[in-house]
Amino acid sequence: MLQYQRFLLVSLFVLVTNVFLSDGQCISFAKNVCKSELGKFVHDGNYNATILSEGETAEVYKTFFDGQAYRIAVCKVEGLPRILFKVIDSEGEVLFDNSEHDYTTTWDFGVETTQLLTIQLNVLEKDEESLEKEAGCVAILFGIRAESENRKRR
Amino acid sequence: MKKLFCQPLSFLACLIFLAFGLLSCGTEGKKSKSNEEQQIVESVKVDEKFMDEFNKSKLIFYSLPSPLETAMLIKRAGANYNEALLNPLESLNRYTTNRQMALNLGVYSADLSYTSLFDQTQSSIKYMGNAKKLAASLGVIDAIEESTIRRLEENMNNRDVVLDIVSETFMNSNAYLTENNRPEIAVTVLVGGWIEGLYLATKLTNGSMENNKRLIERIIYQKLSLYTVINLLEEYKGNEDADYLLVKMNELKVIFDQVKIVNTSKVEAHTDAEKHLTTIKADSDTYMSKDVFEKLLEKVEEIRMEFVS
């Protein structure tokens, strides 16, 4: 009986700890859901994920090198509304806006001259008046086309 | 207490209820304002613009070229493989402080990416072993499991799988540290990896600006990445390790400031909706004098040697 009680206590501790640890952790989401969106592009290994709620904005600064082909994958948990993402140059000019492409979550980019660009993400709001806001994991991953893929395309 | 133990199912139900109850009050899940908060918002006149900005505050990420991306840039620039440039495997035992371990987790990850890109699988396995040990010493759980190393061994001839493994192990460490409230350590790993990539690139020029102009161009454009590195470190100003790295990066900046990158035309984008592809174009000029190049080689080597010593 004592062993049974101990087992139960340990199980409960693990259960409760896991419930709390999962709070704020988006790694599983990024690995298991978002990474596959990169398709045959190799994930660069950088981890950009966080919890965002409706109406919140995040910006990612990244240098895109000429000659490399990139895929950007923007992922969100199911409960969140759509995400608007834009690619902006250092002068603030919008170079790509996914709202013009049905809020696509993946897009490929090539640069002919190396550029430091900003990717702006905005979680849209279901209802601007509502005080209840959904929140959840949002990840942005960058994929680079592997050399073998480049060779196949030539 | 005895009664509680005798009713494990009720106790379990209470704990689950309590856990989920508390969870719903946290930052994750639905963010709802309590009635009290609602009353405050309704009854107090606030500067609406300020509140709007406050509620929609921006979160900023600085994405450095990862060790894998840097290794790809080096390879595509036509550089060769030179094992003598890597941080020796036996240096591992020297790294005892968190800063040393984090920096060299980045360094070994960059070396691992370089060996993998050049199909040096035996070396890749050894460098992954070192990265695994440093990650474990930093308390990163399951960043690199034994099964990952076995998978690497089994796929020695499949570069795509090897690169996928390298990328995933790097993300695991980075994510674990970030999400377990140790972002300064995660940033230190990134900086270690970036400096090692820059060190490999500069050494592979063999001290000449003429041998491989493509590689020189890659080095010049690391000026943009350096701004990202400095901005990233500025976020952790006040942390001893971040302050140390900021000093080093600012020393590098003094030299990179003398490197010129100028966009000579407006940046333009051409989107092919069918191919889901946007091509970004701009004309630019770059310039780095021989003197600046030599100073850069010297400084990068000095910083890298300090990191690995």
Image (cartoon, coloured by chain):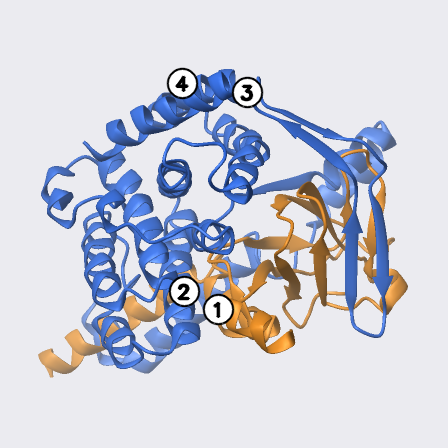
Type of amino acid at the residue the image marks with label 3:
Ser
C-alpha span from label 1 to label 3:
44 Å
The local secondary structure at tag 4 comes to helix
- The image quadrant where one finds the N terminus of chain A is bottom left
Contact flag, marks 2 and 1 (Cβ < 8 Å): yes
Q: How far apart are marks 4 and 2 (CA)?
A: 31 Å
Q: Name the residue under label 2.
A: B168
Q: Which secondary structure lies at badge 1?
A: helix
Q: What residue type is labelled 4?
A: Val
Q: How far apart are marks 4 and 1 (CA)?
A: 34 Å
| N-term-proximal mark, 4 vs 2 | 2
What colour is chain A?
orange
Chain ID for blue? B
Say the numbered circle drawn on residue B247. 4
Mark 4, residues whose alpha carbon is within 10 Å: few (<14), some, or many (≥20)? few
Q: Nearer the viewer, mark 1 or mark 3?
A: 3
